[in-house]
Image: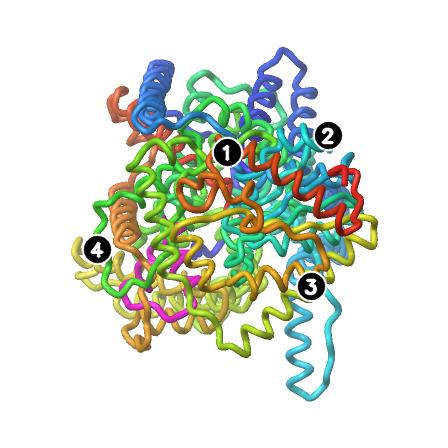
Amino acid sequence: MLFNSLTFIVFFAVVLALHNAPLPWKVKKTNLLLASYLFYAAWNPPFVILLWISTLLDWRVAKRIYAEERLSRRRAWVALSVLVNLGLLGYFKYGEFLLENWQLLMSAIGVAWTPPDWDIVLPVGISFYTFQTMAYSLDVYLRRAKPADSLLDFALFVTFFPQLVAGPIVRPTQLIPQFQKPVRASANQLLWGLGLMTLGLFEKIVIADGALAPAADAVFGAAKPVPFLDAWLGTLAFAGQIFSDFAGYSTVAIGVALCLGFSLPDNFRFPYAAIGFSDFWRRWHISLSTWLRDYLYIPLGGNRKGWHRTQVNLMVTMLLGGLWHGAAWTFVVWGGLHGFYLGVERFFQRQFGGAKIATTFGFKVFLALLTYFLVNLTWVFFRAPDFPTAWRMTRTMLGSGLDGSVPVLSTYLITVVVAVTVGILLVHGFMRNRRLEDVVASAPWWLVGSVWAAMLFLILIAQGSGDAFIYFQF
Amino acid sequence: MPSSTSSSESEPVILRPVPGLRWPRVAVAALLLAAVGLGAWEAYWRVAQHYEASYRNSDGQWAQVRRRVDAREANATVFIGSSRTLFDIDLDVWKEETGVHGIQLALEGSNPLPVLSDIANDEDFRGLLVVGITPPLLFLPGMGVRAGVIEYYYDETPSQRISTQLSYPLETTFAYYNIDTKLFTVLARQPWWPSRPNLPFQQPEVRKLEHMRRDRQADLWERVETDPEFHAIVTGTWQAILENLPPPPPEEVARAQFQALLDQVAGNVAKIRARGGEVVFIRPPSSDVFREVERKITPRERVWEPVVGAAGAVGVHFEDYPALSEVRTPEWSHIAAADKARWTRALVGILQKAMTERGVHRPEVGS
């Protein structure tokens, strides 16, 4: 069920009414669990079984790990959880990719082999809930968390509908304790939650789908090479689109949870104002980057095993992070570029980190713009349907490969992309060291009301296309 | 990624702060202001632009009508084609004349052959299929404007199905809630945008042309006839499209593609007949510039006749019957709403006669 659908409005109204009805807490939690299954089944009912498999497996595994003292047994149990969860993810998400690459490998050594047809539908959000439920078993194994006391609480943790299909990916210690005692949103929480939902839907419907998607689609879908201007504007449009789409989803998720009285962590902190790539990853998809840090980068050794090993660990983490986004080599290259940037940044920090110029405002602005420039180059690989398109776009953006180019963007689309991109950069720059809640709290009430009304009005007249959120496919 | 070296601590519960404002007052102000804005927007479209509430002709609506073929109406009469079949057939008159409430699946700006294949592969269908032909659209490289609707029908989620139902009351209440009046569509169409040098022709989006019912009965919007300015916009759009048609492929390629098309038509018609169904072809009227261009690029003897011949089916071309050609087509391509009942009545009579003469007996039309 999409947040930007009429079905969700009715669904959420019913859930909210039941959650505020005079019912026992256990009944309310059961309602939330059933609502979460319904939310997921609204895409494809049979895939609810996958949620049940993940839930029951990790529930049992965590109990066993916690009760077991022998390290080898504990390792075996956690390995079972990881294998089954990654096995499901691999089967549904990477099966076709693996077969295609195996076929290419075989043909490279002269073996003719045709893979079987792979007509498997990707369960929406499987990458998100797989990582969330794995975090539970891993945290119990690492003794960071105790197993949940109640299967109901754990099932709700795995399935909680606001963040089920596109995050934020929450840790058991962030959410399960919130299910243990009755909560209900105060009037202020409810209204602020509705305000966050409006903000998120505005980002998705007005900015991502309405203003920016047409230009990005036109440029990346062009049959012929496009000029320098179009290549850059198409990429800037996609940069704004994917941020508004994904941050919009997270903001709605946080708002929905808050309306019910639950707190979810931030997933974005104005990433296009980042100064450097370490800073970028502290601001972009925070719940994934911290997951990768805690369950991959640090177990690999983090930065505790010397300079070279740190670089390798960073690169491995970012390559796998790229692959997490999609079963295609273009995503791996996207991750690899980020790994490379992080490595180069560490090199420069080690060499010149103490230089006085690094603390000046002008140099920080320069670094922020450089970061944004380089991030945009990575988005080309993220968005392009294939490598030929990605190479063509990259060459054009770097000033070569312009022969035979044909423009695709009208002056209308050019104007919209420039205006919205400048707007996004100004907002991110202004908000870089601020929290949204603090800025809103310091504004006069009539201004907040007017901005809220404007967003609501624009959502209603933009009408929306009912397009799915981009990150659902991951 | 964050470069912390240690994360041995578990992530704690985060309590989200709520900005310290008087939120009830803020929320009421926001709702009131948004309501005022929306009211003004609705009034603009109703009063200044003469829009009225109408079904949106969404993919969900098409899917809902398409499901009738699968369910209780296996022996139904189904219409496929482009906007001419959509606008020109009067479902009420069809029912009066034949006793059958037809299922309207024609899609504007679209090649009907993918839908023909879909119906041919639907084992449930054993009725009469009326295929409307707009000759140039048979040669679209893809399905056209409504590409994706068949995929949508098969992939439609329960949530999408419910959203379509929930959307209907809004569609029939708000005039602004229309594909044609989306904010960014309206912005893109403003005349103040300068043209960009060297930008290839970009096919303009067609403005609102019809008033649609829930069963997809669609009448040509009267504003096309009564408002000279709007009429000029519509005909200007057709003119621009017709003047910028892509060049035809080389002769040999075109011949091979057309033969494949004929084979596809013949194969699909044979599948439907094998199940006890029947297929007829109709060519609804066009006029003025549209007809001139169609005569030039898709002459009747090189497109219509071979298609009907390949199918071995009854074909009714408007040029052969005064009752079908003597109608008003205000913007050259669709019959005026006031004339469609007469046209449909005449079509039923002509089809009955033509089918009877060919020895095709179908209860759906009483031949």
Whichever of labels 3 and 1 marks the residue nearer the N terminus, that label is 3
From what the image shows, is residue B44 above or below residue B273?
above
Residue type at mark 3: give it: Ala
Q: Which residues are magenta?
A: A212-236
Q: CA distance from mark 3 to mark 2?
A: 30 Å
Q: CA distance from mark 3 to mark 1?
A: 32 Å
Mark identifier at residue B310? 3
Q: Which residue is mark 1?
A: B339
Front residue of this view, candidates B123 and A273: B123
Determine whether, in the image, residue B96 is placed left or right of residue A385: right
> For the residue carrying disc 2, how many other residues have a C-alpha within 10 Å: few (<14), some (14-19), or many (20+)?
some
Determine whether, in the image, residue B315 is placed left or right of residue A359: right
Rendered residue at 58%/53% (across/down): B133
Which of pointers 4 and 2 indicates the residue nearer the eye? 2
* Marks 4 and 3 on same chain: no
- How far across and down, in percent of the image, does residue A418 sit? 26, 51
Determine whether, in the image, residue A156 is placed left or right of residue B186: right
Chain containing the residue with disc 4: A
Residue type at mark 2: give it: Gly
* Marks 2 and 1 on same chain: yes
Q: Which residue is mark 4?
A: A365
Mark identifier at residue A187? none
SS category of the residue bearing label 3: helix
> For the residue carrying disc 1, how many other residues have a C-alpha within 10 Å: few (<14), some (14-19), or many (20+)?
some
Q: Which residue is mark 2?
A: B99
Give the main secondary structure, helix, strand or loop, of the magenta stretch.
Answer: helix
Q: CA distance from mark 4 to mark 1?
A: 67 Å
Front residue of this view, candidates B183 and B113: B113
